[in-house]
Image (cartoon, rainbow, N blue to C red):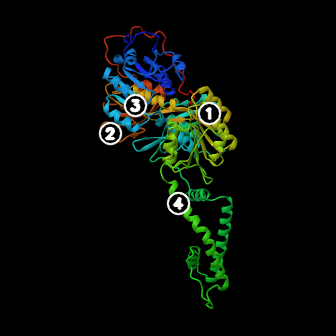
Amino acid sequence: MTLDGRESPRGDGYAGHYIVCGGNALAHRLLQELVEHYEVPVVAVVPDREQDHGPRIGRLPGVTAVLEAASVTEEVLRAAGVDRAAGIALMDGEDRHTIHTALAAQGANPGIRIVLRMFNQRLGEHIERLLPNCTALSGSATAAPAFASSALGRPNSVPVDGRYLYVAYDEDIREDGRLCLAADRIDRQDLTRLRLLPDAVGPAAEFIALARRIGDAGPLPPGTAPAPAEAAGGLAALQTLDSEPPLRIPWRSRLRWALVDALHSVTGVRMRLVLSTALAAVLLSTAVLYLGHRDLGWTLYLALLDLAGAAQPDTPGAGGPGGPWARIAQVVITFCGITFMPLATAIVVEALASGRRGVPRGPSAGVRGHVVVVGLGSVGIRVATLVHETGVPVVCVERDPQARGIAAVRALGIPVLVGDAPLASQLRSARIHHARALAAVTSDDAANLEAALEARAVRPDVRIVVRLFDDDFAHHVYATLGDVASRSVSYLSAPAFAAALMGREVLGTLSVYRHVLLVAELAADAGSGLVGADLHAVERPGGVRVLGVRLARRPGDVQWNVADRSRRLVAGDRIVVAATRSGLARIVGPAQPVPSAVPPAVPPSVPPPAGPPDGAPVSR
């Protein structure tokens, strides 16, 4: 174990600090959140200062100390001053090792706040009940809805009190259900001009800005030039709906895709030619029967019996409706039935076999309008599952045959292409030319960019969502490829981990292009500083906007857009806010540190930097 002591070389030299264990992207972002927005002392524990995000963490200004340890043991925790720490975040390792470390930290400091990053959410819920002051979160579960919603082309939403909050843009902004302006000065070619939760002089200012944008006649029709006052940029508004916007897929299309899928799975090209000819013959013969009977019901009855080989032949000399042409038609239908019945049996057997859980299968030629998910890590699993739950077909691509996500998605009946074949070949096999979207969510920025470029080369209009970590890289990708949504798992989920470490809960995150808004519900209690404050005092232009209030006397209801902004909050009230990262940090503040008789040995020599603005680009 090595120690880079920026303030003190000993773990007993500082107190009331926060410990972040991990060397991955999420640990890196969490450290940035703590030192730049919450401005609290932080000790980082990384497995290797030269691997993964260890070098970047080592260069972060404002971090009190950086320890290097292959695994987080009790000795490492003592060196990090766990007995005097206010909180600890365990962001790396398997769930089993994370739980073991959490128990050791809680044993050394019963009052410490613990935040765990866990893949198994169900197990995390049990750990929360077992350990006091413990919160178990999943970075992939927090960020996956934004990826899935972008791939499906619908807004990401956060459920609050039976309603769904989402961000609408320009002509999609509705006056009913609108809570506040989420952003203005939106320029897709220069997102640095975008302002989150822009300044407003009272609630009326937002209505005036919206009226200027849409005019008296309602939303601007497509192609209409905006008013001169708003020509410099568009608007985004935070809205509520009573139910999440559904994803409507025509049942006829789904039925057609299913039939084509089943047909291609049991037949070849020559067999399909024979079946097409036989089908044409059956239809023509059925028309002949109808001309003889002039009764649609009897025509269908006889045709189906003949097709199943159950028709009764006419005896010699017996006359029947339609004459000899009707008999010829029945013979044709009967012989064609010999071809169709085995095929129908094969389709049923294939459907039952492929429906068994865990049976590997690849995408057939009948797949249409699907989403291709590249990468089956923790994020890829959740994105594929969320899209699958909407009823939209999914095809997954994974190069590592040992990836744990392969079995998980195959258990849902999702086809997976596995192997180290060229990515272009894999995407063609995944039928990217018929897909509605591609979600590249591997942990490698270069691999995600390659997938996006290959997909764009095959189908220029396909919707693309890529996972990128590096902000500058994401900006160049967006500027070069145009209509590409870049999302960052660590950027979307780190604010929730930081708020949990401060003793607060973030309900969800909403993306405004490559920027993020946090939706949180805060309680007015003795330690929050909200008791006695009115809504005007809580709100900060560009940082915080109060969306609703849950009064102590009516805890079951949220009053949205409360008109009385001067009402002071009392103990037991709760407020729902939309906030930027720094805005939420200013409200919640750091949690009360554990009392300690030993003050920090040396005060911070270099004050934490102001950090990037809340409009900083979102990448991976």
Give SS at disc 3. helix
Marks 3 and 4 sit apart, C-alpha to C-alpha, by: 42 Å
Closer to the chain start, of discs 3 and 4, is 3
Please state which amino acid type lies under the numbered disc 3: Arg
Rendered-image quadrant of the C terminus: top right
Closer to the chain start, of discs 4 and 1, is 4
Q: Residue at x 43, y 17 (%)?
A: 43
Please state which amino acid type lies under the numbered disc 1: Ala
Q: Is 450 positioned to the left or the right of 532 in the image?
A: right
Badge number at residue 349: 4
Rendered-image quadrant of the N terminus: top left
Marks 2 and 1 sit apart, C-alpha to C-alpha, by: 48 Å
Q: Is 151 positioned to the left or the right of 98 in the image?
A: right
Marks 4 and 1 sit apart, C-alpha to C-alpha, by: 39 Å
- Report x, y in % for residue 310: 55, 77
Give SS at disc 1. helix
**Vertical order, 109 against 201 (above or below):** above
Viewer-closest of 7 and 22 = 22
Q: Residue at x 63, y 59 (%)?
A: 267
Badge number at residue 447: 1
Marks 4 and 2 sit apart, C-alpha to C-alpha, by: 55 Å
Is residue 561 visible in the rendered structure shown here?
Answer: yes
